[in-house]
Image (cartoon, helix red, strand yellow):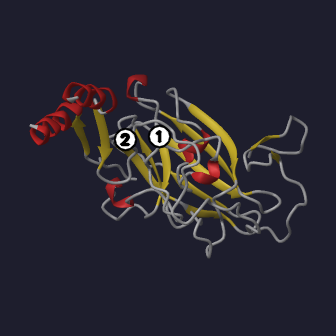
Amino acid sequence: MLFNVLLTTLTTLTVVRSQSIGGSIVGPIVPGTTGKLGDAPITENNPTGVTYTAFLPNSNTTNIRGFVSGTASNNGTGVVFTVSLTGLPPADLGPFLYHIHDQPVPSDGNCTGTKAHLDPYIRGEIPPCDPTQPETCQVGDLSGKHGNITGNIFFTSYLDLYVSTTPTSNAFFGNRSVTIHSSNTTRLTCANFTLAAPPSPSASSSSPYSTSSNGTSSPLPTGSGFSGNPFTGNAVGHFVSGGAIVAGLMAFLL
């Protein structure tokens, strides 16, 4: 019996990796996991034409440059994000994660000050986000919902239905920040979102994205009318080996 307990523990808990503030836990996706306050609702009536952009800083501690920008969709439902990055570290440090963090970058520029991910429905990071059910993920987990950053140069654009440009919404991101992490969740660089465009006086009745019944979305084909258009610091990672956990179990059982 003791052998079976130890074998199971070694198999399932060989390495448990955690992050002190706002990192990610490596583990299996568990479909249906959602926040303590339920799923994130689709955001509607976002003031169209509003854009918030986070420009990554020129820093002597990282070569990562570029921006993450979010604009309310033409029909006010969700936010269209554009991510454009260069100078990413070697691939063995990736794939790279990025999230909207709950707090802005502090004046000292330390990315740990951005705290945890934007998570108004108290979903937490364990287990990881299921991209097939984005409404169950943390609102700020952009890479969890839409894919990690890969390569030295990276560009993507997508519609996120659960983030808002409305300041009164708990999914509002305009007064928060974006943080880019290596695959071990070290914070590589971060920047504050700032208002880049005023509200549009009127909303368009069309959207450049199609939305499925489960809330996921994808760009419409070409010709649909859609035109694509700091601070650094390190969080301290903590690693807990399975051996330490097994030793504790043996002490308990013996």
Circle 2 packing at 10 Å, graded few (<14), some (14-19), many (20+), is many
Q: Which residue is mark 2?
A: 185
Question: Residue 174: x percent and y percent?
Answer: 57, 65
Circle 1 packing at 10 Å, graded few (<14), some (14-19), many (20+), is many
Q: Amino acid at mark 2?
A: Thr
Give above or below for 139 relative to 214. Answer: below
Question: Residue 41: x percent and y percent?
Answer: 67, 62
Please state if 165 lies on the left or on the right of 29 as rendered.
right
The disc at residue 29 is: none
Inter-mark Cα distance, 1 to 2? 7 Å
Please state if 240 lies on the left or on the right of 113 as rendered.
left
Q: Amino acid at mark 1?
A: Leu
Give above or below for 9 relative to 140. Answer: above
Mark 1 secondary-structure assignment: strand
Question: Residue 122: x percent and y percent?
Answer: 48, 62
Could you tell me which quadrant the N terminus lies in?
Answer: top left
Give above or below for 137 relative to 30. Answer: below
Of the numbered discs 1 and 2, the one sitting upstream in the chain is 1
Q: Are marks 1 and 2 in contact (CB under 8 Å)?
A: yes
Tell which residue pokes out farthest to the bottom in this image. Answer: 168
- Residue drawn 33% across and 54% down? 21
Mark 2 secondary-structure assignment: loop
Q: Which residue is mark 1?
A: 97
Please state if 202 lies on the left or on the right of 248 as rendered.
right
